[in-house]
Amino acid sequence: MLNEIIAFLGRRGEFFYISVFMLVMFFVFLISWLVEPRRLINGVFFTIFLASVVIWVTVMVHKSTSHGLQRAYDLLVLAAFFLITALLIFAWLFLFWNAYFVWKYESHTLPNLLTLIFGFVALILSLMFLFGSGQYLPRWLSVLLASIPAIAIYLGLVLYNFLINLLLYQIYPRRYKQDYLIVLGAGLINGDRVSKLLAARINRAIQYSNRQYQKGRKRPIIIMSGGQGPDEKIPEAVAMAKFARKRGIKTNHLLIEDKSKNTYQNMLFSKRLATKDFGSSNFRSTFFSNNYHIFRAALLAKEVGLKANGVGAFTRLYYLPNAIIREFAGVFVMHKHRHFVIMGVIVLFFILQAILVATGNVKFSVI
């Protein structure tokens, strides 16, 4: 029987194997994502599946008898390659353009200057790529400086994986069977009024609550989570509850968590409050924040053992790049030990290469 299976597979050819691999990767990704969407590995699985789809289409096109289709496909691939390369090289233009709008419409704080900072970094890397970083330097120093774009490539891959997970998380299926809806707080205007950004989170939770009730299920309890900042007159949760009551939410459908100072504490303290109110930790919950924030918040929810996924509220488009960079930095810090080890290995590799070049052992260098 085994010999027959091997013989059958041997007659199928490369197209068959690629098709099987593509389907396997699709189901690996789908199962992993549906079971636990808060895993960063999901982005890797999806990317492998996406790459297998591209390979599958390429093989299919080149096995066809239409030479016109093959030429058109090759031109499309070439155009896509040059477009992606151009976008990467001139990404600094977009970052500077976005930084202008953030500077114009938002407060001039360091977190709101991230696109400007990244724009300068992207410009320097682009110049190094276009003109070379070491043509006027000793070769060993040029080899050592090559570690900078190498680390930039690694960080780019990490950023790409974060973006894929962030996008996938936006479309994760919603289950309208929740006991609690947790709304994450944000800064108040003049220390006592809900901002538009925070209002969007509350309104999204109210919309979710109404939708669940319309489906014939019980109305969930909304937990307003947010402490009082040094420049705030009242806790964020108190202002949020007041806003929700004006929108028709009854007091007996509200709980206030007013001690948290950050997203980690939002999740931890809300979990404790819900557990006490429910009588056990077997409750079902969903949390609400802005769309750029929900994936990092989900990672923190997982960290405190809260079984909850997020629903994102709309964010103004010009603000998204800056906010996404900030979220990426937050996720990067959460796994900083792993990243610093990998970047350390990269730097060590280039140091060894530079030493080989400096000592004249060029024949052992791979650069």
Image (cartoon, rainbow, N blue to C red):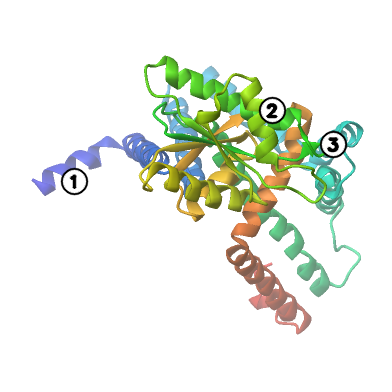
How many residues crowd mark 3 within 10 Å: few (<14), some (14–19), many (20+)? few
Could you give the CA–CA distance between mark 1 and mark 3, rounded to whole angstroms? 72 Å
**Residue drawn where x is 35% and y is 44% of the image:** 282
Q: Where is residue 349 in the image (x, y as percent from the top left)?
A: 65, 72
The quarter of the picture where residue 119 lies is: top right
First in residue order: circle 3 vs circle 2? 3
- Disc number lying in front (3 or 2): 3
First in residue order: circle 1 vs circle 3? 1
Marks 3/2 in contact by CB < 8 Å: the verdict is no
Type of the residue with mark 1: Ile
Name the residue carrying label 1.
Answer: 6
Q: Where is residue 215 in the image (x, y as percent from the top left)?
A: 39, 16
Marks 1/2 in contact by CB < 8 Å: the verdict is no
Q: In which quarter of the image is the C terminus?
A: bottom right
Name the residue carrying label 2.
Answer: 199
Q: Residue furthest front?
A: 252
Marks 1/3 in contact by CB < 8 Å: the verdict is no
**Residue drawn where x is 64% and y is 47% of the image:** 159
Residue 90 lies left or right of residue 323; in this view the side is right
Query: Mark 3: which secondary structure?
Result: loop
Query: Is residue 147 shown above or below 92?
Result: below
Name the residue carrying label 3.
Answer: 190
Query: Mark 2: which secondary structure?
Result: helix
Type of the residue with mark 2: Ala
How many residues crowd mark 1 within 10 Å: few (<14), some (14–19), many (20+)? few
Residue 243's disc is none
**Residue drawn where x is 88% and y is 31% of the image:** 105
